[in-house]
Amino acid sequence: MKYKILALMFFALSFISCAQTKNDTLFVAHWNVENLFDTINDSLTIDEEFLPNGKKEWTQDRLEKKIYNLSRIIRSMNDDKGPDFLGVCEVEHQSVLDTMLHNYFSDKNYKIAYLESPDGRGIDNGIIYNHDKLSLLKLNSYRVNLSDGYNTRLILEGVFLTQKNDTIYFFVNHWPSRRGGEEKSEPNRIQAAKTLRSAVESILAKNLYSNIIIVGDFNDEPTNIAITEYLKAQPFICDSIVESDLSEDKSTDLFNLAYQSWSNGSGSFFYRDDFNMLDQIIVSKNLLVGNRIDYVCNSFEVYKPEIMVTHTGKFKGAPFPTYGGLRYLGGYSDHFPVIAKFKIN
């Protein structure tokens, strides 16, 4: 009888341990998926380039190949378990994400949070999330009003609840590009930073210990002033910061997890023989010093599966894109994804 009781106790403890292990982490990712257009002409946007008779000769076969390629990379994340949060940008319509989930993720309980942007090209931000771990409470968007009146992408915010009743505010960004030059276009990104900062401050005003995760293609690097001075996201290096000092510092509430990787020479986008860290993950202080959800130190990385790395030529080491100019290459994206892990205590 004693052995039966011990066996039952062992089984119960094993079951509890497995259940905890299954749900004790959050895997966060962001990916600029490079012009994920459908093949249908949208009269409200400038999408003519990505039509079967357009310059890129964007056919249904090419779209299906692109969706397949993206799904391979996404499925491989998190030790082949896939991400729990995935922010995406450069998507024309939710329908292409719906198709990807239907065709390649039917075994996953993934849901989509998505809003159409006023962007002239019709490219939007979206969120794919693991509904086994997360429930969507609310979906918000913030319009970035540029001085020239150009319509750029909305900043997307999903408010989520974990299984342990923790609220997470998840923002997806695709800030205005550097077209026309970095300096000339910088005021547009500063305006995006101000818009996002205002949204963050409204959250923190209600609860200083809020869990905020900000991802995106910022078209700026971690030390550009739109990030550091206007969004007020400070560089973060795990090994050099004492948690007690961080808790007592009242001057900073956002920290850039991408900074350390960028300072070591890594980047998500290859431009003119150099890597740029345009894609970043930024978090509120509570995710670094809180006792409920904690960033796993040094888990931020630029995700570079071998199958999407260019191995020869002048772009060796860069992401393998869908197009090189107008030439179809059949690759994945011109950006690498970025990832980070969080532990739920």
Image (cartoon, rainbow, N blue to C red):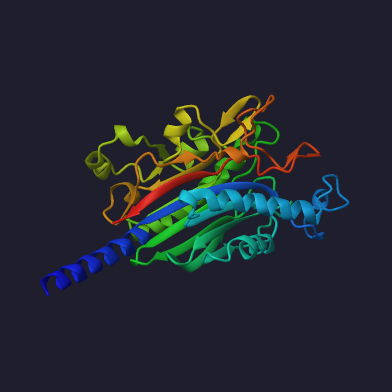
Residue 217 falls in image quadrant = top right
Residue at point 45% right, 28% down? 263
**Residue 119 appears at what percent x and percent y?**
69, 53
19 lies left or right of 216: left
* In this view, 314 is above or below 74: above
Q: Is residue 145 visible?
A: no
Whether residue 329 can be seen here = yes
Image coordinates for residue 15, horizontal then vertical, percent: 29, 66
Give the quarter of the image for residue 164. Answer: bottom left
Judging depth in this view, the residue of 203 and 87 nearest the camera is 87
User: Does 276 sit left or right of 60 as displayed?
Assistant: left
Query: In which quadrant will I find the N terminus?
Result: bottom left
Residue displayed at 55% across by 44% down: 337
- 115, above or below 35, in the image: below
Left or right placement of residue 172 versus residue 320 in this view? left
Q: Is residue 58 above or below residue 300?
A: below
Q: What residue is shown at x 69% (from left), y 40% (from top)?
A: 321
Quarter placement of the C terminus? bottom left
Residue 215: x, y in percent? 50, 48
Residue 77 percent across, percent down from the top left? 50, 49
